[in-house]
Amino acid sequence: MPNITFLPANVTVVADQDENLLRAAMRAGVHINSSCGGAGVCNKCRILLERGQVQGEALPEGGWKACATFPVSDVVVRVPVESEMDRKVLRRPTAGKAASWIKAQDEVISWKLHPAVRKHVISLPQPSIQDSASDLDRLKREVVQGRLQAISLEVDNQVLFNLPESVRSNDWRVTVSLMEGAKKDVRRLIRVEPGDTTDQHLAVAVDIGTTTVSAQLVDLRNGEVLGEASNYNPQISYGEDIISRIEFARKEEGLKTLQKKIIECLNGLIEELFSDTGREKDALSFITIAANTVMIHLFLGLDTRFLRTQPYTPVATQFPPVRAIESGINVPEHVRMFLGPCVASYVGADIVAGVVGVGLNHHPELTLFIDIGTNGEIVLGNQDWMACAACSAGPAFEGGGIKQGMRATTGAVEVVHIHPETFEPMVLTIGGRKAKGICGSGIISLLAGLFMAGVLDQQGKFYNDLGTERVRLGRDGWEYVLIEAESTSIGQDIVFTEADIENLIRAKGAMFAGYYTLLESVGMGFEDLERVILAGNFGSYLDLDQAITIGLLPDIPRDRFFFAGNSSLLGAKASAVSWPVTKELYEVARMMTHFDLSDSPRFMEHYVSCLFLPHTDQRLFPSVRLD
Amino acid sequence: MPNITFLPANVTVVADQDENLLRAAMRAGVHINSSCGGAGVCNKCRILLERGQVQGEALPEGGWKACATFPVSDVVVRVPVESEMDRKVLRRPTAGKAASWIKAQDEVISWKLHPAVRKHVISLPQPSIQDSASDLDRLKREVVQGRLQAISLEVDNQVLFNLPESVRSNDWRVTVSLMEGAKKDVRRLIRVEPGDTTDQHLAVAVDIGTTTVSAQLVDLRNGEVLGEASNYNPQISYGEDIISRIEFARKEEGLKTLQKKIIECLNGLIEELFSDTGREKDALSFITIAANTVMIHLFLGLDTRFLRTQPYTPVATQFPPVRAIESGINVPEHVRMFLGPCVASYVGADIVAGVVGVGLNHHPELTLFIDIGTNGEIVLGNQDWMACAACSAGPAFEGGGIKQGMRATTGAVEVVHIHPETFEPMVLTIGGRKAKGICGSGIISLLAGLFMAGVLDQQGKFYNDLGTERVRLGRDGWEYVLIEAESTSIGQDIVFTEADIENLIRAKGAMFAGYYTLLESVGMGFEDLERVILAGNFGSYLDLDQAITIGLLPDIPRDRFFFAGNSSLLGAKASAVSWPVTKELYEVARMMTHFDLSDSPRFMEHYVSCLFLPHTDQRLFPSVRLD
């Protein structure tokens, strides 16, 4: 790939595949004004070509539109005076994003292949007058006396319905599906099929998030993911966050409605997985589900009232495997559903699955596992011990409670830089489309950018004497105009208000106070952290420096940060592939010490100290230099 | 009670409560002609009062109608010349009926009270910030750590739905229902109710017979039977016997229809039990069911095809307890259903329950257990070993395949004596109503009577030169006219045909050949039998001498015979009251050695020898004297 050198900063980066010059500049830490996010409409992102060849849109006034121009050879481009800064480049080249944990840790994706349900082909002796044992006893004899891994065998009554036909239709050769259970050496016979069907053996792994539901179809012969599907959690129409869903569930038919919605959603995803991959549902053996405690309660139709109020008691935290059709899942009768174990009302099976998915329980390094989702859960520990807590961070980092916040889809502002002298923004949107709103990473980027450019003070209030029209008194108080109406797809200015900032500071404050309290409670400090693993898709987009600048992440060496993507789904998949992993879920849930931060005076103290950018105690953020 | 002396025989009996003189005479072995069964219409049962006082119907020609007359004081009555016999009394006073096994064996009705599901009241500590365990964990802790009999606890997911409400609505005091399982020290939590509900703890015990379905409501606090209900098995409309039901089940929707019918029937009986006793269904904890193997298959909707043909393999012989609603039983969700274990296709859970019900497995005496039902099953053994077999006897003794056979209900001829000189009958019907037909005990009584009176030869053919019009050539061959049309309620002669007799001889031959083969196969003979227990309601009506006379029962001392009534229901009830008894069912099913008589040449030989009255080998029946 060609080199791109930006002048006057004299910064060179290697071009990425299909990356336009605007994106390359952002990556290089070079500011170029741009409002429309790369949609090609604001015409602000002009650059001048000094050497080499580009392909793209030339501007009538000379130069090229950076957001629509790509290098063909090594190029040298100059950022024109309207975008140029005195300091030539951003404060420093950004540390960029966290490394992929999955790539760093090959072993996590090579779980020992040993699913909870296994298929075995057996041949039965034909019955005779001398041996007229029942069909079931005949089968049991082969399984148990033949020591097909089982010392004792439990049997689903449902197996009996087709048993006479199944054993006889392929000359007494059948495939049995044996399920592992809580007790060693006990197996449960859940299915008998005529002939050899061992090549038809699939599982579906599911993560039910408050916002998004994701599912993977896994081939249990080799652990391969055959397909993936995801959708918004349709319960969103009844409440964006967990608390509003619990409130809705209290209404007449509320709980039933929410349950119905999530089951419909899951059924839709399963249909999609099978139709996309051209596989038969009949090949499905079981489903593994990870989800937070509230989502599991709503999925099962359990009363969520007491999850809402102190002392926050769930109905249950462990759920024995049941037949999926009993929960309304539209799959064959034999299909079992494994729901992961939860720790507490606000530390659910998603976190446990995430921790096991990333293998935190297999490493000696002190690790902080962070899921910045709707709620904000954290786990601190290693293979020997774990402490966990929920931070009640709220959905601000998912765009919730932010005036023009939105989810990370096409048209969302995903990264921003603010010119420290002109206060003009450099904006990139997902898909390079006209902006609709600002997603999580964009919000962090914007907050950090405004703060670093000196538009905001440490309390998150706007300086209103900067001489820029972008800071103005709007309907909701002081605000920064990120994109003018004409460059958006929504026909109105995209702004960022002091109220938004207040919400964000509270949210990041809750997270940081959470890490601090957990560390402190085990007599440790941030310097002891050997790894920080960011769960959720969020983590892969997050600019580490920006997140540290606003005090969302601790200020430790950047190479200790990793992102794990949807670690809950990763854990659900690992659990589908490997029964030992499923057992680990229970072990990890058991070993986690849960701290109820809502009841911790230390947490409250820390929280109050965190309501600054980045923090009241500047010593905690040595790398964040305020000029 | 007054004495009744019959002249000229000079036999005295003590009157029974509400017993008329005709019944007393039958009991005393005194013949009095009577056709209408005691309905008061034939006016043949005239007797003359010689001393004492009676109340009843005097006849215009003098004397009293025996069937409508009762003694008020000690009486002496004379049987007039038209009824009198040369030999004055019947061959000998009948040995009467078998003794009640239940009365003889007090222990069988005092099973240790320890039902499979037990209720316990526990108080839970309230949750707090320091102890915010889930409601379920809180409960488990009390059950398991409190060592409420359980070392480990499995939990029905269904329990979770009302759990938060249940634990909180009575100040954290609840009643838990714990179910025993196959594994020691493992209990299953099937129900949690607020407060103390230990006084609401019921079971229903059921026997599903081919002909009749019976159920009892049992109070599990004390083992008391609160109510009983029974009805015909509605599957009868689709086939009188097992084989015809299996045939019907092969038809399109046939199996489903039969299943639906029996479930409707059971639901009806359960409704009846609860409405009759005024108890709430909510107090029901579980149901125990005994039934033959085919009935269990039809009840569960299992394929019966392979039960019909050699080598007669059932789908299964053991069925783990399931929730009753899963089978369509209309009871609360928590209610479990325990189906007894079967031995083979034609030795079912009814026999196992019967054997355990009568305690055969607790006694050292060599016992022959006989169930003369639709099929005819026999068990030989004691506490140490058991052999069992089905005899394919057919339903003749239940009135099936007998021209005017009927079930033992009002209007059925239940006992008969034939005058050895005039060949006139003395007939009693159930309820003293005009006869509709002949039930099992009447059939045996009639066959024995005709044989002993010299109306039949040893091959069961009529002597047609006896000079009585009662023996005549009817439409179906030679027959005996038991009751003339005008004395019946059906407006036609009630007759007994040679074809009927042939069926009966085959049926009793199959039974007897069965006993003989089983005894022989263990190197024993009839003289070794210490007890014979007759199962089924049949046994209590059976006249032992008559049954021995026709060769249905072995000719051994009469005091070795006992009747047990519906021993299958008895076993189901014992199993409801006592979990140890339920476990005995499985032990007994396992210890029974099953002989497939259909494959035994010795059985065929014995069978052929049995096609005589009483038997080809007269030495086997020393007490049956043919003059």
Image (cartoon, coloured by chain):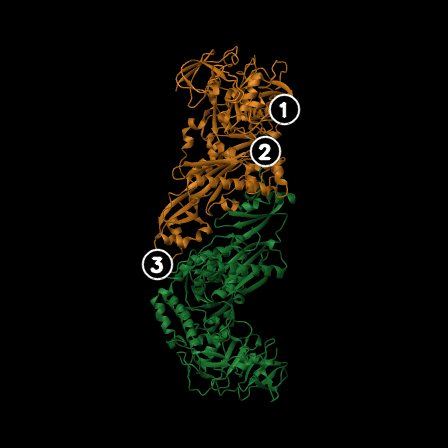
Chain colours: A green, B orange
Question: Residue A448's spot in the image, x, y percent?
Answer: 46, 78
Quick one: label 2 or label 1, which is nearer the N terminus?
A: 2
Asked if labels 1 and 2 touch by Cβ distance under 8 angstroms, the answer is no
At label 2, counting other C-alpha atoms closer than 10 Å, the crowd grade (few under 14, some 14-19, many 20 or more) is: some
Residue under the image location 65 percent in, 44 percent down: A169
Most distant residue in the front direction: B60
Q: Which residue bears the numbered disc 2?
A: B241
**Label 2 and label 1 in one chain:** yes
Q: Secondary structure at mark 3?
A: loop
Quick one: label 3 or label 2, which is nearer the N terminus?
A: 3
- Which amino acid, mark 2? Asp
Asked which quadrant contains residue B210, the reply is top right
Asked if labels 2 and 3 touch by Cβ distance under 8 angstroms, the answer is no
Quick one: label 1 or label 3, which is nearer the N terminus?
A: 3
Q: Quadrant of the N terminus of chain B?
A: top left
Question: Residue B587's spot in the image, x, y percent?
Answer: 49, 36
Q: Secondary structure at mark 1?
A: helix
- Which amino acid, mark 1? Ala
Q: Which residue bears the numbered disc 1?
A: B499
User: Between marks 2 and 1, how big is the CA–CA gap?
Assistant: 19 Å
Q: Which residue bears the numbered disc 3?
A: B128
